[in-house]
Amino acid sequence: EYQAMVRDAAVRSPDMHLVRSMGLEALNSESVRSFRQRMKLYRPRHMWESLDDTAFLQKIGAIGDDGGLLHPTFAGLLMFGNHQDILCEYPNYAITHREQLDTKGNWEEAPWSGNVYEFYYWAYNKLQQNAKKPARQALREVLANCLVNADYHGSGGIIVSKGYQKITLSNPGSFRVPLDTAKSGGVSDPRNAAMARMFRFVDVGEYTGGGIPNLYRIWKSENWPEPVFSESCSPDRVSLTLYMTGHSGAENTAAGKQVPLSALSQRQLLIDYLTDHPTSDLFALSKALGTSLSRTESILQQLADEGIVVVEAGQGNRLYKLKA
């Protein structure tokens, strides 16, 4: 507990420090490639776009120079590191996703064997399914907040749990901003500030203090129960429980029925899928989107017309990928 207090009191975020025992091989090249592709989409023609990977990673704070030798920062290791390398520095590193399978109380538990960046997109794709449209942006924020505020040296790990009408996010660590202050907005103090900055480059996380007020506003507008934050000690742990009851109309989630995604969400899901699967055919994309082949093809054509997606001839079918 004392060590946690020292880390939290540091003027410079601890995740900005270098992992001097490791070199750049500790970072996963596919994770870096995926991140750069997303940043290119969200921040086109950014001044760092033409940099090689090493220079780019230095700019975003994922690596640093120590007497001519390059090492990952702790933020870079957590965001992009290989799982075993992360465990070498963070023996307590653990992220688990739990999902309710039926109304009988059966759950599927999936321990994550990767880095924080890859988990964010995998988990958000799970969370936003069956969620009402106003809640989806809020879920992006609360998931990011859970990850950037976790104490990765703490015990218990991160747990993201999704039931039919309830989502719970739990992470090691304590509140850094009093809840009443956070609910009022305007104050942000992420525990892992360098990690939060990296997420912002791909349009994830607000970190201006407006995320929690927005969360309460959305839940109130939907007439859902107020979000419940709880904090426990020994070990320090913060949990957020979101009840999503009272669903109605076209977005009813009874019996796990999938919610239709908006056109904007469908576009984003296709872009995210192609970021992680660089070349895909129409059938794979339609399955990932959960919609018809004709609808998927229509969205892909729009993306192609906008210069985001390119179409290539494959063996008997067309292949789609993001424009380089």
Image: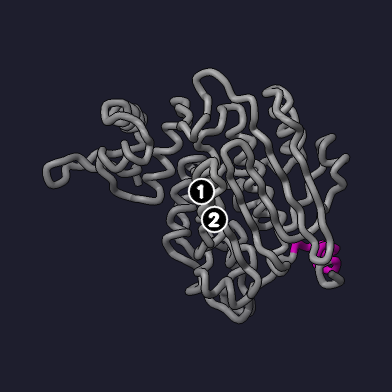
Residue 265 as seen in the image, left or right of residue 225: left
Q: Which residues are magenta?
A: 5-13
Question: Helix or strand or loop: what does disc 2 sit on?
Answer: helix
Q: Residue at x 53, y 57 (%)?
A: 109
Q: Mark 2 highlights which residue?
A: 117
Q: From this view, report whether residue 138 is shown above or below residue 194.
A: above
The coloring applied to the image is: one colour
Q: CA distance from mark 2 to mark 1?
A: 7 Å
Residue 27 as seen in the image, left or right of residue 145: left
Residue 145 as seen in the image, left or right of residue 86: right
Q: From this view, report whether residue 232 is shown above or below residue 164.
A: below
Amino acid under label 1? Tyr
Q: Mark 1 highlights which residue?
A: 121
Tag 2 near tag 1, CB within 8 Å: yes
Q: Position of residue 29 (x, y in %)?
A: 43, 64
Q: Position of residue 87 (x, y in %)?
A: 58, 74
